[in-house]
Image: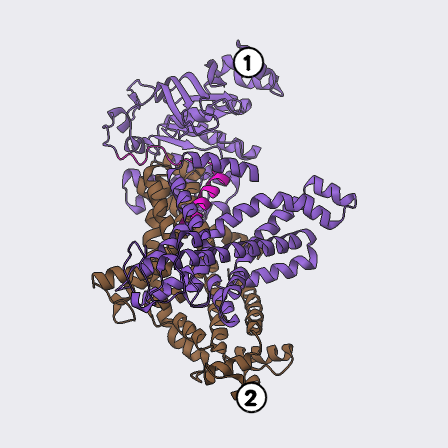
C-alpha cells in the first residue's frame, strides 16, 4: 500500500504544476528556517527601540516590529519553533493513535471496550475547545502546547487503526501465526504494524494541515511559546495591534502558516484522490445547454401508419472512448442492426457482457461516459437521433420511450415516495393538473396490480416484486409506444415473474406497445417474444422469429444455447403451440 | 422514531457522563498546587509565595474542592453540576453558568451566521464540483475551497479587518454594534468550515449521480433542475449530514478564535479572558458547557438525519 501510494504520488506530481510550485515554496521556506543562523545575522529577540516599525528594506527584508526586532529573523527562527512543534505533535499523535488502536483492535474484550469509550468521550468534545482548555490549564508553553494538540488529535487515528487491526487480525497469516503460538508482541510487530504503515501515512498526511492550524491557533491565543521567543501564530497575534502602521507584521507570519498548511492540504487531496479514485459518471451531455434541433413530427406524435419502426438500430458500434477507463479501446457493440415495430415484442438474448444492456440504453440516449456511439445510427420513430441534445432526448424519454431497469432495488429513488416517482413522469411531460395525474397514477397502479396504499410508501417498504411493478408503472404511466425492458424479471421470484410477463403481453396486445425485451433467460424470452436476436460479444449472431430460433436454430452458438436449456423439449412444444 | 430518539438520548447522556469525568480531571493538569497557583495570580502577579499564608491556601483548596480524596471530590462536584451549578468565577465572584448563559446568544448568532456563509459557499461549489467533475470549473472550485481551508481563521479575520475596516472603512473592525458588525466575523468563521462541507458534498453528489436511480430518473425524461435538486441532492446530503459533527466542532472551536480576533462578545472571548486571569473554574465550566452543547447538537442532527433518509427510519422500526 505504501509503495503504491508513493508511486501514485510521484506519477501525479510529474504532471502537477501547482503541486510542484507548492513543494518548491515549502521546501525553500523549510530550508531558510533550518539554516536561519547562516541566512540572517539579526537576533530575533534583540530589541532596538531606535529602529521600531521600519518598513521592509535591504537591512530588514521584512521590516521591524514594535520592539525594533528584525521580522525576517523572527520569521525564520519562529518557523523553527512552529515546525518543530508540528513534527513532534505528528509523531506523538501517531504513536498514541497507533498504540491504542492496535491494542483495542488486537486484544478486544475489556481492553477494547475501555479504550473505545475513552475515544468516544474525547471525540465528543469540540476539538479546539478541549485543546485550548488543556493548554490553558497547563499554563502555556511549548510542551503544554504539544500535549494539548496531541491529546485531542489522536482519537480519530486510534479509531481508524483499530478498524484496520480488526481486519488484519482475521487474515489467514495472522491467524496462522497465532495458532502456532507466536508471542503477541511478535505478531503485532511483524504482521499487524507493518501492514498499517500505509494507512498511517495516509492518515498523518490528511491530518497534517489541521494539526498545524490548531498549533498556530493556540499560539495565536497566547498558549504557545513564551513571548520574547518568536513563533508564527504568536507573531501574528503580537502584530495585530500595529497592523495599521505595519501590515508586514501580520502578513509575514500569516503567509508562512498559509503556505505550509496549503501545501499539506493540497497533498492530502492528492493522496485522497489516489486512494479513492474510482471514476464516476453522471448523465451524459446534460450540461450542454444546446438549442433544440426541433423534434420530427413522428416523435412528437408517434401514431400508427407512419410505417417507420419505433426504433431502428443500424450498424451501431459502441466503444470505450475514455482513455482514463481501464477498458479503454474495448468494443462493446459491433455493427448491430435491429428494429422494433409497433405491437411487436423483440427478444434480445445474450450472456452477461454481451452488450445487451448497452444496446437497450442506446434506445433512450442513455449511454454514459466512458462509452460512446462511434458508428452507425439509432432512429427513433423514423428520426435520426445523431444530433439530438439533452432536451430532444428528454422530450421522448418517459413519454414515447420508457425504460424498465434490470434492478428494481436500485432503480427507485430511496428518499421519494412512490406517488411522486410515478406522478412526476406525467407531470413533466403533460403538465396535466394534479387530480388528472393522481387519477392516472391510480389507474396505472391498478394495471400493474398494485394496491393504492403503495402511493404513500417509500421504495424500501415494498417487496422486490412490488418495486419492479412500480418501475413498470413508471414506464407505462404516459402510455409510451415503445418499452425497453432490460431484464425486467431477473431479480424476481418465479410467480411474480409470470405475473409481470403476463402483464407485459397484455399491454402489448391492448395498446399496441412495442417491446424490446432484453434477457439472458431463454425460457422467459420464448414466452413473450415474437422475434429473437442473439447477441454475442457485441455482435448479432442470429436473428429470426421466435419459432425459427427455438425450433430450428442454424447458427452453432444458437444451437449450443438451445441445447443448454433444461427441459428443452417442452419449451419447443410451447413455442410451436403443439 | 421515539424509541430511537430515546436510545440516542441515553447514549448522549452516557457520553456526557464521560465528559464530566474528563473535565473534572482537567483541573489536575495545573502544574504544582492549583490553589497556590491561583493565589499567586489573584493577589499580585509579581508577588512571591512568601506573601501567601497557609490559611489562604487551605481556604482556597476547600473552595476549589481539592481537600478530599478524588472520588469524593468528583461526586460532590458532579452533584453541584447536576443542580446547574458550574461553580463561581474566581475573579468576578459570579456564578459561571449565569455568565455563560448571558454570553451564549452572541456565540450562537455568530455561529448561525457562519453556517449561512458556509452553505452559501459550500452548496454552489460542491454542486459545481460534482457536475463539472474533472473539468476546469471543478479544479477552480477545488482550489478555492483548498485556499479557504488552509487560511488560518485568525489570519483571515485580521486580513478582512485590515481591508474592510482599516483601508476601506466600510465595516466596523471589532465589537458588536449593529448587524453590519456581524459580517466580517461570520465570513471568517464560515469560510474555514465551508471547504469540508463542499468536498463532502461534491464526493457524495458524484456518487449519487452514478446511481441507477439517477439513470432511471434520466430515462423518465425529467428536466435537469428536477433531476439535480429533487432526485440527486437530497440523497447526496445524507452522508454530508452524518459528518456534520466536523462542522459543529469547527464552528464551536473556531468561534473562540474568531471572537478573540473581532472582540465579539460571546462565550469564547469570556474563556480567553479567563485564561489570561487564570480563572480555572471558568475554564473548566466553559469546557463542560461547550462539550454539552456539542453533544446536544450532534444528537439533534442525528434525529434530523432520520427524517432525511426514510430508509433508516424503517430500520429503527424493525430493530428498535
How far apart in space, not on screen, are marks 1 and 2 (Cα)?
98 Å
Q: Can residue B245 be seen in this view?
A: no
Front position in the image: B210 or A521? B210
- Asked if residue B25 shows in the view, the reply is yes
Q: Residue furthest right?
A: A181
Q: Residue at x 39, y 52 (%)?
A: B150
Count how many numbered circles sit on residues in the image.
2
User: Can you say which quadrant of the picture contains the N terminus of chain A?
Assistant: top right
Residue denoted by label 1: A557
- Please, is residue A131 above or below residue A207 in the view? below
In the foreground, B296 or A532: B296
Note whether B301 is above or below A562 in the view shown.
Answer: below
Q: Residue at x 53, y 9 (%)?
A: A554
- Measured as percent of width and height from the top left, residue A54 is found at 28, 62
* Tag nearer the camera, 1 or 2: 2
Q: Colour of chain B?
A: brown
Q: Quadrant of residue B71?
A: bottom right
Considering only vertical position in the picture, is B12 above or below A361? below
Mark 1 belongs to chain: A
Residue that numbered label 2 is attached to: B59
Query: Label 2: chain?
Result: B
Where residue B148 sits in the image (x, y, percent)?
36, 52
User: Is A145 left, or right, of B70 in this rendering?
Assistant: left
Q: Find the magenta span and give its range.
A: A262-289
Q: Chain coloured purple: which letter?
A: A
Amino acid at each position: 500500500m505504501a509503495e503504491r501510494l508513493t508511486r501514485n504520488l510521484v506519477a501525479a506530481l510529474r504532471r502537477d504544476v501547482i503541486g510542484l510550485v507548492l513543494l518548491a515554496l515549502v521546501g525553500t521556506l523549510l530550508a531558510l528556517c533550518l539554516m536561519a543562523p547562516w541566512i540572517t545575522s539579526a537576533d530575533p529577540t534583540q530589541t532596538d527601540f531606535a529602529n521600531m516599525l521600519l518598513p521592509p528594506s535591504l537591512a530588514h527584508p521584512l521590516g521591524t516590529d514594535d520592539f525594533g526586532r528584525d521580522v525576517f529573523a523572527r520569521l525564520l527562527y519562529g518557523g523553527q519553533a512552529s515546525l518543530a512543534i508540528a513534527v513532534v505533535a505528528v509523531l506523538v499523535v501517531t504513536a498514541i493513535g497507533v498504540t491504542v488502536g492496535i491494542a483495542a483492535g488486537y486484544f478486544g474484550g475489556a481492553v477494547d471496550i475501555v479504550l473505545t469509550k475513552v475515544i468516544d468521550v474525547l471525540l465528543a468534545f469540540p476539538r479546539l475547545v478541549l485543546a485550548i482548555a488543556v493548554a490553558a490549564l497547563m499554563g502555556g508553553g511549548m510542551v503544554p502546547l504539544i500535549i494539548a494538540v496531541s491529546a485531542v488529535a489522536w482519537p480519530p487515528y486510534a479509531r481508524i487503526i483499530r478498524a484496520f487491526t480488526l481486519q488484519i487480525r482475521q487474515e489467514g497469516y495472522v491467524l496462522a501465526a497465532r495458532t502456532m503460538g507466536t508471542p503477541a508482541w511478535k505478531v503485532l510487530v511483524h504482521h499487524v504494524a507493518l501492514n498499517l504503515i500505509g494507512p498511517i501515512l495516509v492518515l498523518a498526511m490528511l491530518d497534517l494541515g489541521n494539526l498545524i492550524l490548531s498549533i498556530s491557533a493556540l499560539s495565536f491565543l497566547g498558549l504557545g511559546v513564551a513571548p520574547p521567543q518568536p513563533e508564527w501564530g504568536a507573531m501574528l497575534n503580537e502584530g495585530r495591534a500595529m497592523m495599521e502602521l505595519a501590515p508586514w507584521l501580520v502578513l509575514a507570519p500569516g503567509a508562512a502558516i498559509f503556505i505550509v498548511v496549503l501545501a499539506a492540504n493540497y497533498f492530502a487531496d492528492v493522496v485522497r484522490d489516489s486512494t479513492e479514485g474510482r471514476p464516476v459518471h453522471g448523465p451524459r451531455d446534460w450540461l450542454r445547454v444546446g438549442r433544440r434541433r426541433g423534434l420530427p413530427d413522428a416523435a412528437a406524435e408517434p401514431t400508427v401508419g407512419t410505417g417507420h419502426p419505433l426504433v431502428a438500430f443500424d450498424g451501431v458500434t459502441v466503444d470505450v472512448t475514455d482513455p482514463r477507463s481501464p477498458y479503454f479501446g474495448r468494443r462493446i457493440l459491433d455493427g448491430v442492426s435491429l428494429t422494433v415495430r409497433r405491437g411487436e415484442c423483440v427478444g434480445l438474448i445474450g450472456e452477461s457482457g454481451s452488450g445487451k444492456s448497452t444496446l437497450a440504453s442506446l434506445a433512450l440516449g442513455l449511454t454514459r461516459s466512458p462509452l460512446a456511439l462511434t458508428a452507425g445510427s439509432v432512429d427513433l420513430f423514423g428520426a435520426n437521433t445523431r444530433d439530438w441534445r439533452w432536451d430532444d432526448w428528454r422530450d421522448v424519454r418517459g413519454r414515447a420511450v420508457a425504460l424498465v431497469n434490470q434492478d428494481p432495488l436500485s432503480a427507485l429513488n430511496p428518499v421519494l415516495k412512490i406517488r411522486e416517482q410515478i406522478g412526476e413522469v406525467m407531470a413533466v411531460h403533460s403538465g396535466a393538473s394534479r387530480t388528472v395525474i393522481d387519477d392516472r397514477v391510480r389507474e396505472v397502479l391498478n394495471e400493474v396490480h398494485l394496491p393504492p396504499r403503495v402511493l404513500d410508501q417509500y421504495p424500501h417498504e415494498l417487496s422486490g416484486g412490488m418495486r419492479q411493478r412500480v418501475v413498470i408503472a413508471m414506464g407505462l404511466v404516459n402510455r409510451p409506444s415503445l418499452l425497453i425492458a432490460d431484464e425486467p424479471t431477473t431479480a424476481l421470484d418465479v410467480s411474480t415473474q409470470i405475473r409481470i410477463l403476463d402483464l407485459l403481453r397484455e399491454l402489448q396486445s391492448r395498446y399496441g406497445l412495442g417491446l424490446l425485451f432484453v434477457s439472458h433467460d431463454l425460457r422467459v424470452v420464448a414466452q413473450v417474444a415474437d422475434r429473437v436476436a442473439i447477441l454475442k460479444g457485441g455482435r448479432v449472431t442470429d436473428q429470426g422469429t421466435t419459432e425459427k430460433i427455438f425450433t430450428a436454430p442454424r447458427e452453432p452458438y444458437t444451437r449450443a444455447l438451445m441445447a443448454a436449456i433444461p427441459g428443452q423439449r417442452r419449451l419447443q412444444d410451447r413455442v410451436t403451440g403443439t | 422514531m421515539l424509541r430511537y430518539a430515546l436510545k440516542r438520548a441515553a447514549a448522549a447522556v452516557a457520553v456526557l457522563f464521560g465528559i464530566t469525568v474528563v473535565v473534572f480531571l482537567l483541573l489536575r493538569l495545573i502544574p504544582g498546587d492549583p490553589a497556590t497557583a491561583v493565589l499567586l495570580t489573584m493577589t499580585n502577579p509579581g508577588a512571591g509565595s512568601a506573601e501567601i499564608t497557609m490559611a489562604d491556601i487551605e481556604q482556597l483548596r476547600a473552595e476549589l474542592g481539592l481537600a478530599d480524596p478524588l472520588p469524593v471530590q468528583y461526586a460532590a462536584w458532579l452533584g453541584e453540576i447536576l443542580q446547574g451549578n458550574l461553580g463561581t468565577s474566581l475573579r468576578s465572584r459570579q456564578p459561571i453558568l449565569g455568565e455563560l448563559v448571558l454570553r451564549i446568544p452572541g456565540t450562537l448568532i455568530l455561529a448561525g451566521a457562519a453556517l449561512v456563509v458556509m452553505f452559501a459557499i459550500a452548496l454552489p461549489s460542491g454542486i459545481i464540483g460534482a457536475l463539472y467533475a474533472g473539468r476546469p470549473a471543478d479544479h477552480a472550485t477545488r482550489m478555492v475551497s483548498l485556499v479557504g481551508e488552509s487560511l488560518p481563521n485568525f489570519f483571515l479575520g485580521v486580513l478582512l479587518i485590515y481591508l474592510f475596516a482599516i483601508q476601506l472603512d466600510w465595516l466596523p473592525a471589532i465589537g458588536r454594534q449593529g448587524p453590519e458588525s456581524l459580517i466580517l466575523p461570520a465570513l471568517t468563521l464560515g469560510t474555514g468550515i465551508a471547504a469540508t462541507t463542499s468536498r463532502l458534498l461534491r464526493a457524495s453528489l458524484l456518487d449519487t449521480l452514478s446511481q441507477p436511480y439517477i439513470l432511471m430518473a434520466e430515462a423518465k425524461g425529467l428536466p435537469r433542475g428536477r433531476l439535480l435538486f429533487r432526485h440527486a441532492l437530497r440523497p447526496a446530503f445524507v452522508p454530508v449530514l452524518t459528518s456534520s459533527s466536523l462542522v459543529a466542532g469547527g464552528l464551536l472551536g473556531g468561534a473562540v478564535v474568531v471572537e478573540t480576533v473581532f472582540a465579539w462578545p460571546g462565550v469564547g472571548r469570556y474563556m480567553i479572558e479567563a485564561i489570561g486571569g487564570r480563572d480555572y473554574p471558568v475554564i473548566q465550566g466553559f469546557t463542560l458547557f461547550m462539550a454539552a452543547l456539542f453533544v446536544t447538537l450532534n444528537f439533534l442532527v442525528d434525529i434530523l438525519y432520520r427524517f432525511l433518509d426514510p430508509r433508516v427510519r424503517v430500520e429503527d422500526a424493525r430493530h428498535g
